[in-house]
Image (spheres, helix red, strand yellow):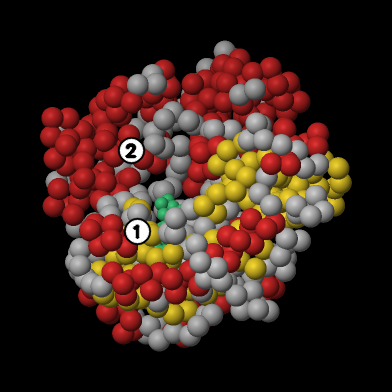
Amino acid sequence: MKYEELCKIYERLEATSSRLDKTEILANFLHKLKKEKNKEIIYLLRGSVFPDYSQKEVGISAQLAIKAISKATGIPAEDVVEEWKKSGDLGKTAEKLVKKKKQITLFQKELTTEKVLENLRKAAELEGPGTIEKKISLLAELLSAAKPIEARYLIRTVLGELRVGTGEGIMRDAITWACFGREKAKEYVASVEAAYDKANDFAAVFEAACHGVKKLEEIMLVPGKPVKVMLALKAKNIADAFEQVGKPAAFEFKYDGFRMMLNKSEDGKITIFTRRLEDVTKQFPEVVEYVKKYIKAKSFIIDSEAVGYSPRTKKYRPFQEISQRIKRKYDIEKLSKELPVEVNVFDIIYYNGKSLLNEPFRKRSELLRKIVKGKKLELKPAEQLITDSESKAESFFRKALKAGHEGLMAKNLDAPYKPGARVGYMLKIKPEEKEFDLVIVGAEYGTGKRGGWLSSFVIACRDEKTGNFLEVGKVGTGIKEKQEVGLSFDELTKMLKPLIVEEHGRDVRIKPKIVVTVVYQNIQKSPKYASGFALRFPRITRLRPDRSPSDIATLSEIREEWEKETGRKKS
Ligand code: ATP
């Protein structure tokens, strides 16, 4: 296919913000694409040259792109940069410069989508000496053949800045409209979505959909290829959980860590994916060893939660403290000793060559417990209780909290596993939240994208005897909090920066002025904080400009709450 044809589609998609219009433009285009042998053009629609499950990257930065533009147009790199500064958009810059050059070029070869895929994929595979030069040449070759509009979108594609609004939902709808007709979309959209949640590959889904719904349903799980995880809904309490998932139900400890999909493919290779489909196998060498040691099967996909613990006290630690392991690329062995994880396996969706997605949870869980022989602090099945008794479930809930976990998950014993879906087959139950007004006395600068912004905040109560402010915990940031507070953490940073009184590396001390409402789940004794207590799972929910630091919760109020919770005092 001519690349220009695709670029015209990008242009039309960019020109409308209406979801329906975008779906229609895409569906019409896909209708044409049905006849093409190479369905992988669909990746380009999404601004990539690989399926969504792939971790591969073209790896061309703006600096390299500038050199390629210069090479293709004969315009010095400094002039390209000058031009870029004016528009702020390197795609537009490439378009303008290619246009300039084209006035003197007579002959030109048509650029095809196949050639774009080929060159950009080659660029992604390059390694070793000379890589940079070769990448520049591959892109320059495309740019030399490109029409101005093609240059614009080529550059945006390699920089990951296509942004034409071809998100997952729109792609799913467009494939449905193109293959089954717009009128029948309602009937078929769920099959397209289910296939995508298994494959994470729109070319494969589109190819199957072209051949009908049966082929879509045949899309299989493949161990070693990431699949979306099933998501949870909430239950208010144990009674509500039984109401939603039926009796008896399986209750499991809810570990406060992060999701890990453990895969073993038929050739024995082990891979670990996060719920965002990132391959983190290299980051968790000890988990690979546990999987080999404790799970006996030829092939599988097993769902689990990895939770961090302190190597010294063996106590579980909150997710934030181990989250750095997910992205870490160096000192991996060292970090695995400092921030070890325990893997709690709780579901199996593929076993020895067969998908178990449609088997009931009862069966999947039984099989899992048969093939996993685990060890505490390494890898083991999640703590589980199958019961129809509310009082037994309640005491299991208390046991989970006492052991330092977030609460329970309640699971429907007859339910299948639906990748990517939030269908209420598993529910989370957390203790009722309580709140205190507290003051911010410290913070920490974020790293990476959040560099320059304060990203976690130390909160304190007031010692009514001395008037001092004593720390009771640290609150991290996150999207959820942002929505609740109605104020972004960036805005909070702006308010706090003028109040900084001391800096030690990334840590800062802040003059106690800003009062916030903090909700939490429970209180623990903690030598880490000056108050001697730590709020567990704290979240800032509101700013309290109407309150002064003298109005905040006192140390004795916190102690009293802790006594109530731990049964030292009757409420
Ligand atoms: P969400 O999944 O709703 O986007 P979240 O990441 O905050 O939000 P929760 O909804 O609070 O997670 O709880 C569900 C998560 O709990 C699961 O995604 C999983 O990572 C984790 N989890 C811990 N223990 C278990 C368990 N035994 N079974 C299933 N999930 C568990």
Q: Which mark is in front, 2 or 1? A: 1
What is the crowding at mark 2: few (fewer than 14 residues within 10 Å), some, or many (at least 20)?
A: few
Residue 145 x/y as whole percent:
51, 28
The residue positioned 60% from the left and 43% from the top of the image is 517
Residue type (three-letter) at the residue carrying disc 1: Asn
Helix, strand or loop at label 2? It is helix
Let me know if residue 462 appears in the view. yes
Please tell me whether mark 1 sits on a helix, a strand or a loop.
loop
Mark 2–mark 1 Cα distance, whole angstroms, equals 33 Å
Give the answer, above or below, for where 509 lies relative to 181: below
Report the side of 475 relative to 382 (left or right). Answer: right
Mark 2 residue type: Gly
Is the residue marked by circle 1 packed among few (<14), some (14-19), or many (20+) residues within 10 Å?
A: some
Residue that carries the numbered disc 2 in the rendered image? 169
First of labels 2, 1 by sequence position: 2
Residue at the spot x=48%, y=85% of the render? 375
Q: Quadrant of the N terminus?
A: top left
Relative to the observer, which residue lies in front, 201 or 280? 280
Nearest the viewer among 250 and 390 is: 390
List the single residue furthest toward the top: 103
- Percent across and percent down for residue 514 are 71, 38
Report whether 113 appears left or right of 555.
left
Q: Quadrant of residue 313?
A: bottom right
Query: Which label number is shown at residue 237?
Result: 1
Q: Quadrant of ligand 1?
A: bottom left
Residue found 44% across the figure and 55% down from its top: 432
Q: Is residue 447 left or right of residue 26?
A: right
The residue sitting at 54% across, 61% down in the picture is 522
Instruction: Name the residue furthest front.
Output: 570
Q: Cβ of disc 1 within 8 Å of ligand 1? A: no
